[in-house]
Amino acid sequence: MIVCEGQLSGDFEGFDDTDTIFEFYNGQQWQQAVYSYSYFYSYMPQAKVVQEGGVYRLYVQGMTGSVEVKRA
């Protein structure tokens, strides 16, 4: 189930660690929940947060993988 969908604000530089915050253009913020490093640069990419079971995952356009997130 899609929980949030839209553009991320500003520069996106991929996934890093649990301090990483992803902010959507509408102001909604999600924090990376587990360490997973994958560099990918994009300016204001399309993204979505999908609930898969009890876990939320962030998918970003142009990236092959996703990362587990939680509400910030």
Image: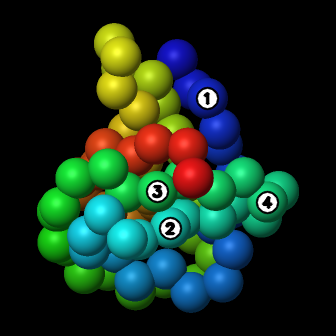
Residue at numbered disc 4: 27
Residue at numbered disc 3: 31
Residue at numbered disc 2: 21
Q: Which mark is residue 3?
A: 1
Q: Position of residue 64 (x, y in %)?
A: 24, 56
Position above or below: 26 against 49: below
Residue at image position (69%, 74%) is: 9
- What is the secondary structure assignment of the residue under circle 3? strand
Task: Say which amino acid is labelled 2.
Answer: Ile
The numbered mark, 1 or 3, whose residue comes first in the sequence reads 1
Q: Position of residue 20 (x, y in %)?
A: 41, 71
Q: Position of residue 61 (x, y in %)?
A: 46, 59
Residue at image position (17%, 72%) is: 37
Task: Say which amino acid is labelled 3.
Answer: Gln
- What is the secondary structure assignment of the residue under circle 2? strand
Task: Say which amino acid is labelled 4.
Answer: Gly
- Is the residue under label 4 in contact with that under label 1 (CB below 8 Å)? no
